Amino acid sequence: MQEQSPKINSLDAKDKAWSGRFNEPVAELVKRYTASVDFDKRLAEFDIQGSIAHARMLGKQDIISKEDVTAIEKGLNEIRQEIRSGTFEWLLDLEDVHLNIEKRLTDKIGDAGKRLHTGRSRNDQVATDVRLWLRSVVDDVIAGIRKLQGSILELAEQHVDTVMPGFTHLQVAQPVTFGHHLLAYFEMLQRDAERFADARKRINRLPLGAAALAGTSYPIDREFVAKELGFDEVCRNSLDAVSDRDFAIEFTAAAALVMTHLSRFSEELILWSSPRFGFIDIADRFCTGSSIMPQKKNPDVPELVRGKTGRVNGHLVALLTLMKGQPLAYNKDNQEDKEPLFDTADTLLVTLEIYADMLRGIKVDKTNMRNAAMEGFATATDLADYLVKKGTPFRDAHEAVALAVRYAVQQNCDLADLPLQELQKFSAQISDDVFGVLTLEGSLASRNHIGGTAPAQVKKAIAYAKQQLK
Ligand code: ARG
């Protein structure tokens, strides 16, 4: 759809939808302040879709004539084309997308156009439009999440047994495989996709028929409209249908969680790509240089994902706050739902897309990862477990290993570098088989259960994840 700014022109008083009630025209500034067409014209396709379904229902129920329905459909289809081709003239004077389209329809087809709004209000109309739009966004979001999960799996598959240090408190904790680390994000995104699929059920309900707030006196058929529009159900209470935006809040909350997950991931990519870590290299097409420091290669994309998370979290708070003070039923406050919602969808969708692509451009420095895992006494827990298996109570084993680590720190070496006799000073139960457990590979392989980091388990986890993506 082509972008155009709405024209500000003064319509004849008779063309305003509610002119009869007023003694003076709306102030210019108020007009600008209250109009939403600038942003809600984005709903046009869905508005037309909803209007066609409504018109067909009115015809089927003999509320308007079949000829009117035919004229309305034809007119709306033409308007859709005008909007798509960018020739449609949006007027700020007509406030929002709904009135702009309705006025154009009336200009085109006369009285039949004026009958379209029978048994309907902009209140149930806008709620319907937003739900239709959001439903299609949710489908795109789920597809985007799937794509990203796919590239996580691709990368994980290449690193089933690549060793890296696992961290707690950002201190080297225990060795893990890089594949295992990546699969943690697969899991987060898996729950995110579930959340959207679940939210979709509540989005996909039809408000139309609620009219302004109390329903309508015409013999409407809401089930018919729901079916036409692919809604699973109709909203069961007219006051609720036109006023609550919890479905939009839920969507935004789910979006904020995806962004939060990707923000965590980004934080890691940023750290790992810094020369201090040197674990990964992010392809140049996702980075920028510095205007002053010639040596710099900055991980802009992950940094922006982290930054944009703040923006989406902000939209969630905006929507919650928008809702909290509203008495039933519709209030104009709700017009403010659109910009945060649109921006949430745009930010999320583009982030998912760029992320899936960025992961494909990541190169891993296995040597640096491995060296880092060697440095931080990452197998100390394995030594404690070794002593436990030889009969030492865990707390005593923990203490013995802590002393050994302290000693190794003083000697500026790793546990595995200490000669057997020195290790034996910390526990008589240590014998020469200890070096097997002090290796990174031994440590990894021993964590061989569902959810563990052993390469054999990571392979299984990838196979399972692939099943889930199908
Ligand atoms: N532009 C309005 C919105 O976004 C449409 C509904 C207006 N309804 C009304 N009674 N003023 O919410």
Image: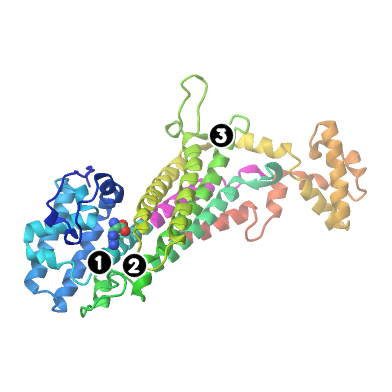
Disc 2 versus disc 3: distance between alpha carbons? 49 Å
Q: Residue furthest front?
A: 23
Q: Nearer the viewer, mark 1 or mark 3?
A: 1
Q: Position of residue 128 (x, y in %)?
A: 30, 64
Q: Position of residue 41 (x, y in %)?
A: 25, 51
Query: Mark 3 is on which residue type?
Result: Ser
Q: Which segment did they paint magenta?
A: 139-166
Asked whether residue 431 appears in the rendered view, the answer is no
- The residue at which mark 1 appears reads as 121
* Label 1 vs 2, first from the N-terminus: 1
Q: Nearer the viewer, mark 2 or mark 3?
A: 2
- The residue at which mark 3 appears reads as 273
Circle 1/circle 2 CB separation < 8 Å: yes
- The residue at which mark 2 appears reads as 242
**Front-lying residue, 339 or 230:** 339
Which residue: 53% across, 55% down? Answer: 188
What element does badge 2 sit on?
helix
Disc 1 versus disc 3: distance between alpha carbons? 55 Å
Q: Vertical placement of 283 versus 331: above or below? A: above
